[in-house]
Image (cartoon, rainbow, N blue to C red):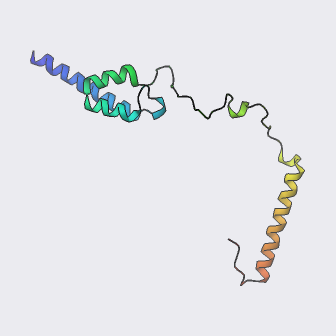
């Protein structure tokens, strides 16, 4: 009788350790029914009942992650959003190239000014 009780105790201990590690290792957005913190407390305070409850009610679905829908999310992923501008070749965009040239000229002008007036502090 003592061996059976010891064996049951070892099984409960192994189940408890497994569940504690699994609860801690599971991402917050995959936990079901309660917040992750609540599951950690339940499993720690009630080893057998908490472990069984975690396995039955709290752990992520085996088929995939159960994510709560983001209230700010749109119906389309960003790359499929209607009206989204398609990427273009920057060499074909004249306004972009013009802004690059102007920026380069401004940087050259500032560099020349710094070379002629070394006491001037560089802009921050």
Quadrant housing the N terminus? top left
Q: Is the residue 94 above or below the residue 102 in the image?
A: above
Residue farthest to the top? Answer: 1
- Quarter of the rendering occupied by the C terminus: bottom right
Q: x, y percentage for residue 10?
A: 21, 24
Location of residue 59 in the rendering, given as x and y in whole percent from the top left corner:
41, 25
Residue 13 sits in which quadrant? top left
Residue at 32% over, 32% down: 20
Front in this rendered view, residue 21 or 44: 44
Name, please, the residue furthest toward the front.
71
Q: Position of residue 24 (x, y in %)?
A: 37, 35
Left or right of 85? Residue 7 is: left
Residue 79: which quarter of the image? top right
Decide: is 46 above or below 102: above
Residue 16 is left or right of residue 96, and the answer is left
The residue positioned 83% from the left and 42% from the top of the image is 88
Furthest toward the left, the residue is: 2
Query: Which residue lies at the image location 73% right of the left edge and 30% below the top edge?
Result: 80
Locate residue 46: give its quadrant.
top left
Disc count in the image?
A: 0
Q: Position of residue 83 (x, y in %)?
A: 79, 33
């Amino acid at each position: 009788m003592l061996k059976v009780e010891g064996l049951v105790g070892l099984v409960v201990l192994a189940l408890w350790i497994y569940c504690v590690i699994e609860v801690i290792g599971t991402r917050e957005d995959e936990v079901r029914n309660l917040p992750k913190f609540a599951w950690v407390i339940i499993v720690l305070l009630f080893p057998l009942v908490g472990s069984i409850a975690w396995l039955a009610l709290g752990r992520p679905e085996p088929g995939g992650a159960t994510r709560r829908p983001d209230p700010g999310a749109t119906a389309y992923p960003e790359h499929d959003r209607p009206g989204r501008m398609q990427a273009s070749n920057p060499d074909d965009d004249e306004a972009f190239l013009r802004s690059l040239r102007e920026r380069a000229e401004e940087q050259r002008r500032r560099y020349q000014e710094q070379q002629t007036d070394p006491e001037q502090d560089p802009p921050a």
